[in-house]
């Protein structure tokens, strides 16, 4: 049994029309999660990307506000000041939901095609990312650029 979770970039809050998907899969429930990232037309404005605590509220005036989706998914209360710079540590040195910390930022990219393995991003159990959202932030501000539901 392979668990699969696909998120598709559906809403882009910023200039240009970005698209793509992030596919999460696990061959076994306690095994590592494979993350297949395919993001296009980022227009070099994207920065970090993260799993956030809550899913998007359909019909909300500000669907990607922190009040709606809350902060990064960090159920183990990892102190982010202990994390190395993005892309320079091991996956256990970042918040569970910190994709850009674990694998590198999106800065200056127009597209990203990548395959990652993460034993600390489960699709089952109490720390599961299922039912949350993936957020792509602007590179030059803390505003949110895109939101993807993990369903």
Image (cartoon, rainbow, N blue to C red):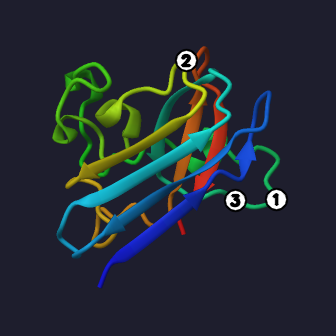
Which mark's residue is nearer the viewer, 2 or 3?
A: 2
Q: Position of residue 128 (x, y in %)?
A: 34, 65
The residues tagged by marks 1 and 2 sit, at their Cα atoms, a distance apart of: 31 Å
Q: Dot 2 corresponds to which residue?
A: 108
Number of dots carrying numbers: 3
Q: Secondary structure at mark 2?
A: loop
The residues tagged by marks 1 and 3 sit, at their Cα atoms, a distance apart of: 6 Å
| Rendered-image quadrant of the C terminus | bottom right
Q: Secondary structure at mark 1?
A: loop
Quarter where residue 135 is shown: top right
Q: Answer left or right for 54 relative to 27.
A: right
Q: Dot 3 corresponds to which residue?
A: 57
Farthest bottom residue in view: 1
The residues tagged by marks 2 and 3 sit, at their Cα atoms, a distance apart of: 30 Å
| Rendered-image quadrant of the N terminus | bottom left
Residue drawn at point x = 44 percent, y = 66 percent:
130
Q: Residues within 10 Å of mark 1 (few under 14, many from 20)?
A: few
Residue drawn at point x = 75 percent, y = 61 percent:
58
Residue 131, visible in the rendered structure: no
Image position of 62 with respect to 107: above or below = below
Say if mark 1 contacts mark 3, CB within 8 Å: yes
N-terminal of the pair, mark 2 or mark 3, is 3
Residue drawn at point x = 32 percent, y = 78 percent:
2
Q: Dot 1 corresponds to which residue?
A: 59
Q: Position of residue 114 (x, y in %)?
A: 40, 42
Say if mark 1 contacts mark 2, CB within 8 Å: no
């Amino acid at each position: 049994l392979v668990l699969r979770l696909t998120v598709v970039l559906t809403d882009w809050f910023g200039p240009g029309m970005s698209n793509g998907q992030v596919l999460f899969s696990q061959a076994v429930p306690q095994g590592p999660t494979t993350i297949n990232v395919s993001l296009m037309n980022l227009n070099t404005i994207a920065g970090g990307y993260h799993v956030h605590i809550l899913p998007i509220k359909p019909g909300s005036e500000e669907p990607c506000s922190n009040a709606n989706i809350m902060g990064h998914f960090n159920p183990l209360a990892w102190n982010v000041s202990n994390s190395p710079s993005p892309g320079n540590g091991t996956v256990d040195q970042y918040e569970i939901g910190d994709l850009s910390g674990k694998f590198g930022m999106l800065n200056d990219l127009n597209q990203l095609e990548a395959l990652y393995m993460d034993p600390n991003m489960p699709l089952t159990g109490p720390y599961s990312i299922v039912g949350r959202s993936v957020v792509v932030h602007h590179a030059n501000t803390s505003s949110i650029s895109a939101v993807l539901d993990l369903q």
